[in-house]
Image (cartoon, grey):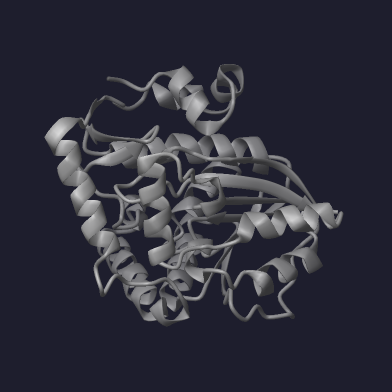
Amino acid sequence: MKLTTESFANLFGTNIDDLSRHCGDLIHSAEFTYNKILGEERDRIMLQVLEKIFAPKLARAGEERRPDWEQGWKENLDEYLASGYNLEKLIPKYFKQYVPARLNLEYIMPLSPNFVFAYTHVYRTWIFKKYLSEVDHIYEFGCGPAYHLAYLAQLFPDKELFGLDWATSSQEIIKHLAKQSGWRIKGGQFDFFKPDPAFCLNKNSGVLTFGALEQIGDNHGPFLEHILKNRPSICVNVECLHELYSPDNLLSYLALQYHQKRNYLSGYLTKLQGLEKDKRIKIIRYHYHKFGNLYDDALSYVIWKPL
């Protein structure tokens, strides 16, 4: 089977015209073919997922995992420097090749090695162009090895970019990116659990998180209040939003169980909906994105802005 322009539009929660306007050319630049996984093979994968969920030592998200991310981004930093500043070395290691994935609440086996990253590249192009094109400054919180920032710098060369992360290796990557490319990009340390009140956003700024908030569980209050205080023009959160999972569907239910076992982001969309009810923010759109790794769908989004 093959993903079409219509398939992408449905998965992203948009229409073909909107998708084509922002990233239509990318859909034909990569091979998006796959096989559905059915029968006994599907059962084996479900058993694998269940074993993972019930594993007694499954790592849980939280502040104590800071050393893991420090080491992970340092691996990207070391490879980036050793390669002579090859931007592909900034791609996180969790993008695996030739492994099963989730698509429209089914298991699939991609037939090209870079299917998952190529898909994510189409998606980020669409969401960046659609929601961040009108701001003058973009702040990515939890930017990791800065591979989104490197792409944003190429998409929007006139914008000022800021990469915030709690890992010093992430900030070191950004220093080299700025020096080697001449891009308008700066790095800084930021702790979701203890935001620095002295750190302020510029006017007409966009806030971006992309799979970063999952690490804070239900402790998103300090970050949200910090963002509300700074009043950005728009906030783009691409995250695993557990409120959108459906307990009536088996694969969605398994993803929810995995999400809860890992202590991933909890109650964030519910909190935003409460803030909207209190007329503190406006939610522009949220969407359950039915694509992910073997265990969950981590690319859902909520777009909002303070009032």
- Residue 254 can be seen, yes or no: yes
In the displayed orientation, state which residue is furthest to the left. 40
Q: Is residue 72 left or right of residue 280?
A: left
- Residue 183 can be seen, yes or no: no
* Residue closer to the observer: 74 or 32: 32
**Up-down relation of residue 24 to residue 190 (above or below):** above
Residue at 46%, 26% in the rendered image: 8
Quadrant assignment, res 51: bottom left
Residue 62, position in %: x, y? 46, 75
Quadrant assignment, res 208: bottom right
Residue at 29%, 47% in the rendered image: 294
Residue at 25%, 64% in the rendered image: 82
Quarter holding the C terminus?
A: bottom right
Quadrant assignment, res 192: bottom right
* Residue closer to the observer: 245 or 30: 245
Q: How many marks?
A: 0
In the displayed orientation, state which residue is furthest to the front. 248
**Up-down relation of residue 305 to residue 22 (above or below):** below
Residue 39, position in %: x, y? 16, 31
* Residue closer to the observer: 73 or 82: 73
**Up-down relation of residue 49 to residue 198 (above or below):** above
Residue 92, position in %: x, y? 34, 57
Q: Is residue 280 left or right of residue 123?
A: right
Residue 79, position in %: x, y? 27, 63
* Residue closer to the observer: 215 or 23: 215
Q: Is residue 105 left or right of residue 200?
A: left
Quarter holding the N terminus?
A: top left
